[in-house]
Amino acid sequence: MRKKCILIMNIIIFLICLSGCWNRRELNTLAVSIGIAVDLTEEREPYKLTSQIVLPSRTEKESNSTKKPYYNLMSEGKTLFDALRNATHESGRKVYLPHTKVLLIGEEAAKRGIVKYLDLFSRDHETRPNLKIIVVKGKASEVLEIESKIEKVPAFSLDKLTEMQKATSQSTVVNLLEFNNNLISKTTEPTCGVIEVNKKNGNKVVEMYGTAVFKGEKLVDYLDDVETRGFLWIKSDVKSGIIVIPSTEENEKISVEIIKEKTKIKTEIKENNIEFTIRIEGDYNVGEFVSDKKINNSETLELIREGVEKVIILEIKSALNKAKDLNTDIFGFGEKVHKKYPKEWSSIEEQWNMLFQDIKVKYEFQTNIHGAGTVSNTAIPRN
Amino acid sequence: MNFFSRKLAYYKLNKENSKVNDENKPKSLLERDIETNITKFKIKFNEMPDVTVRQFEIGNENKIQCAIIFLQGMVDKKIVNESILKPLLYDSFLKQESQKIMPKNINSIDWFIKNIISIDNVSKSKDFDKTVIKCLSGYTIMLIDSYDEAILLDTKGWEGRSVEEPKTESVVRGPREGFTESIYTNTQLLRRKIKNTNLKLENMTLGVQSNTEVSIAYIKGIANTDIVEELRKRLNRIKIDAILESEYVEEFIEDAPYSLFPTVAHSEKPDVIAAKLLEGRIAIFVDGTPFVMTVPMFFIENFQVSEDYYSRPYYTSFLRILRFISYLIALLGPCIYVALTSFHQELIPTPLLITMLGASEGTPFPTILETLGMMITFEILKEAGVRLPRAIGQAISIVGALVIGEAAVSAGFIAAQLVIVVAITAICSFVIPEQVDSITVLRLILIIISGILGGYGIIVSLIWMYIYLCSLRSFGMPYMSPIAPFNLKDMKDFFIRVPIWMMNNRPKLMTENQKKQGADLKPSLPEDKKNKE
């Protein structure tokens, strides 16, 4: 019995002493950050960090008042971590990072090299690897000031915005983990999402489209929405979106929604030429079909199918051309060659940048038009 | 059965020590002279006005002095008057007229028993102390002059509660009768469920002062004889003043006397006890309480309810799983809350965290104090609700709901979400009534641990608890059976309850006689109809 007691006491003492993070914090001592923006300044302390802190309302009454539900805590420092802790000069609560959804990086900062901004967030145990990285055209901190009409907290609205981009597949959404993986890769260049502040009806609005393309750690250029979807087709990352088939006849408007898509890429080295076969298997629904033709016959469906494939090829080509112009292998073609031809890769690796310019791409399609909607004929006046 | 002998060595030791006192007592016997005997009784029953001594004479020519002694209120007066006094005073006199029945010299006390007394249960005794105890438990003592034996007449009959639906275990479907305070009614209720000569009852009297009747019941051929023998030994060990409730016995026969978890099950319903006996368990009836105990007990018995077997298997299985979940919530709800809010805020979904942040803004106490305070408040309210008279009890619940629910939150003392946590925990803990006491204590301990060590502490405590439960035994049987040791056959009545025609075996560890029913009992279409399809 005595021995047992001593054993149990020991266990309890060890439990208390040896357990890892003994760090009790009450909820009301936290400043929960939802979004963080980093910018570069030309001052003595070059790192400027803005963290958006939620200010929750205690009662229903308070939540209806005009009080802003957030506060942007700004601080500067010699490094990013320094800046983060310097925030406590202003706030009585420590910035609590785990719930940070978005990391906004100013264009200027991204152009100078992004690694020194990301290291803190990759290293710190509090942040999550699914933190979304977005480059802001202009100053990043500005974005956190712009309230969306729909969401009260700007950072939440940005988070929702990134979630909803799959509806169009015209912008890239990349999180910290994916970004770091591409950063480490020798051939694949990292990409991330882009937001821009635009004026609409005199109001400032935040819009997200396109892709920021990096070369190494430096931002070089942006892809527009068409190029972005082409890029996503190759990455097999198109979740949904509308394909508008350019009409040949007047009055004819066809738009098709992407239901499901899967891209397979086959790599082959033929006579010193690297050839990729992109096979896109997709299911589509017809959303709009303004024409006097009947939709439920095979000819019309064939027409739609061809139209879809043409658009896809166009999109992919524009993305490829842009990437070749910038000489950045954002698609991960290099990785694919490496995997398929590990022996040959050592000779290819050094000159991949050159070879990337000459890669050949073939297309294969399996296009299924699944639904044609609830009507077979368009309701147009007949003469 | 190795663990048996090892585990219980000290019980045997104790038993040998206690034997010594018993043997030395001189037995007090009855005398031949009735007057001496009556005086003896009167001295014994001094200052007991409820004892009635009725003296009378029988016979015409050679009158015989007789006396009956009984306790008012313990005997059925109608029986005493109609079946003892009337035949002795009236019928025997009549019969003597015709010179047929009453012989001149009655040479044996048996003559009375055989010819005159019309009572079913009659015995004789020379032992004075025994007759006194019998008298105290409702027997009528009959003394006849010149015999040193007393006739013990079973005339028990007292005011008792009738068989009602038990308050603690109500069912929607199933028998509604419950045990009463009378051990005789209780054993009879059990007999009505199992009409089989193999249902054996063994009676004993426990308690030096109270002389409470205790019986053990088991089904011969199903119950493990080793366990029956062990139970007998443990019961015989009990040298206690009085037994007022079955708990008095329970605490003497447990394997782990310091354990938080009960290792003896109890129920108020005859159908439950019958079902447990049929699984090979042994029941212990204690006079004066409607709660009947069964041993050995498994942990799973806390989650099994009689109604599980009276409703459809799918629904039952769903309820079983629900009970397991409720158990976990009742045990872990508040401590997970404490761990999440004071250590692992990153695990709370962001929108929820923000709501919680808002609610805990400006609350003065640390979460662990808040939670402990609320939990203790709830326990106080519960206790007050149980103790108070019904009418006032309702007022308590209103005040409690107001205090907990509204005032504390709106005054900013506690966070609103804590009320939800406490309420859910409270409701869940009532789902497993047998474990309420162990849950209540464990929960408070766990809250403190999680307040110090967070989720890590919870995990360590749970592992410790599980190891402890696995090491616990009830009458030598592993408490966590059939999980540890694992037995697939017994899992048919664990997380899910399979249809009754599939439950072909009794619990493996409980009994040697495992086969309960035939294997091929699945209902199917008659042969001729099958062929048509």
Image: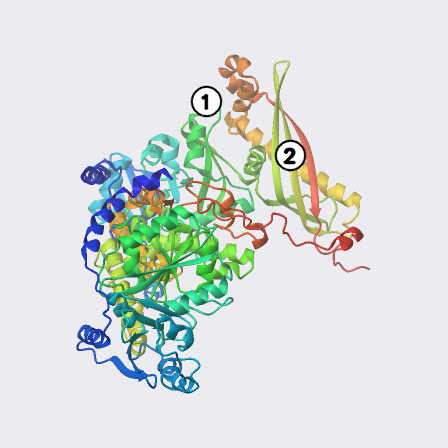
Residue A7, above or below B343? above
Please report the residue visible at 23 percent of the width from the left and 38 percent of the height from the top: A11
Q: Chain of mark 2?
A: A
Please state which of residues B477 and B182 is positioned toward the viewer in this rendering.
B182
Dot 2 or dot 1, earlier in sequence? 1
Q: Whole-Å distance between the Cαs marked 2 and 1?
A: 27 Å
Which colouring convention does the figure follow?
rainbow
Judge left or right: residue A210 versus residue A22. Answer: right
**Residue B255 % position (x, y):** 31, 48
Q: Which mark is residue B18?
A: none
Q: Is residue B147 above or below residue B99?
A: above
> What amino acid is found at the position of numbered circle 1 in the picture?
Lys
How many other residues sit within 10 Å of disc 1, few (<14), some (14-19) or many (≥20)? few
Disc 2 to disc 1: CB gap under 8 Å: no
Horizontal side, residue B303 vs residue A39: left or right? right
Left or right: where B208 falls relative to A61: left
Q: Quadrant of the C terminus of chain A?
A: bottom right
- Location of the N terminus of chain A (image quadrant): top left
Estimate the x, y position of residue B214 in percent, counting from the top left. Answer: 33, 61
**Place of residue B140 in the rendered image (x, y in percent of width and height, measured from the top left):** 32, 75
Q: Nearer the viewer, residue A96 or B363?
A: B363
Residue type, mark 2 in image: Ile
Q: Which label number is shown at residue A280?
A: 2
Under circle 1, the secondary element is loop
Q: Which residue is mark 1?
A: A186
Q: Is residue B37 visible?
A: yes
Give the crowd class for mark 2: few <14, some 14-19, many >=20 residues within 10 Å. many
Q: Is there one chain holding both mark 2 and mark 1? A: yes
Question: Is residue B325 among what the camera can see?
Answer: no
Secondary structure category for the residue under label 2: strand
Q: Residue at x 46, y 58 (%)?
A: B199
